[in-house]
Amino acid sequence: MRVNPGKAPCPFEAPVHVNGKAARVRVDDPRMPLLYVLRDDLDLHGPRFGCGLGQCGACTVLIDGAATRSCITPVASVAGKRIVTLEGLGTPERPHPIQQAFIDEQAAQCGYCINGMIMQSKALLDRNEHPTEAQIREALADNLCRCGTHLRIVRAVQRAAASTK
Ligand code: FES
Ligand code: FES
């Protein structure tokens, strides 16, 4: 994959630490978006490509605990940082409580935004175990859901918070 059409490729070996495992990924350009590396090289398809411009949140991952848009994060910038993707939270057999809450509330319609909603919620609940509804809405305000399941998503985050009481 190329991100600098018109320029000679500049091969780069990117060190990444994802979901508790260290890896080195060879990319053509250190500016390669982290999202491409996660999906294309590491087969982690939880993070989604939505806008590719940092505007929708579908590609959100945690980097050192902060919800971050991987489509506009150059892979070279994450060296030495800990990345967690949706796959790092839980498994289909043992979902994370936030994932289970999204299932229980049937929060997904098409599901495209749900990676971002869950990862943004994880970052929120890590810093505030029991947010108010207003705080949940504020935290998720910049994550777009084209299906309009926002009310169920908010209920899912409330359910996840209640499960930690
Ligand atoms: S795909 Fe990254 S913010 Fe939309
Ligand atoms: S469930 Fe379809 S975009 Fe949110």
Image (cartoon, rainbow, N blue to C red):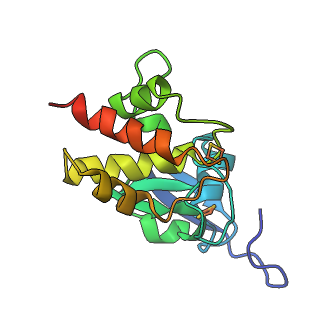
Residue 92: x and y in percent read 50, 20
Describe residue 42's horizontal placement relative to residue 63 as left or right.
Answer: right
Camera sees residue 65: no
Q: Residue furthest top?
A: 93
At horizontal 47% and vertical 58% (from top left) the residue drawn is 15
Q: Residue furthest left?
A: 165
Describe residue 88's horizontal placement relative to residue 115 as left or right.
Answer: left
Camera sees residue 9: yes
Specify the quadrant that holds the N terminus. Answer: bottom right
Q: Quadrant of residue 2?
A: bottom right
Q: Quadrant of residue 101?
A: top left
Residue 143: x and y in percent read 52, 59
Residue 63: x and y in percent read 38, 58
At horizontal 67% and vertical 66% (from top left) the residue drawn is 52
Residue 97: x and y in percent read 34, 28
Describe residue 159's horizontal placement relative to residue 85 as left or right.
Answer: left
Q: Nearer the viewer, residue 63 or 118?
A: 118
- Quadrant of the rendered image holding ligand 1: bottom right
Q: Nearer the viewer, residue 46 or 81?
A: 46
Looking at the rendered structure, the number of numbered marks drawn on it comes to 0
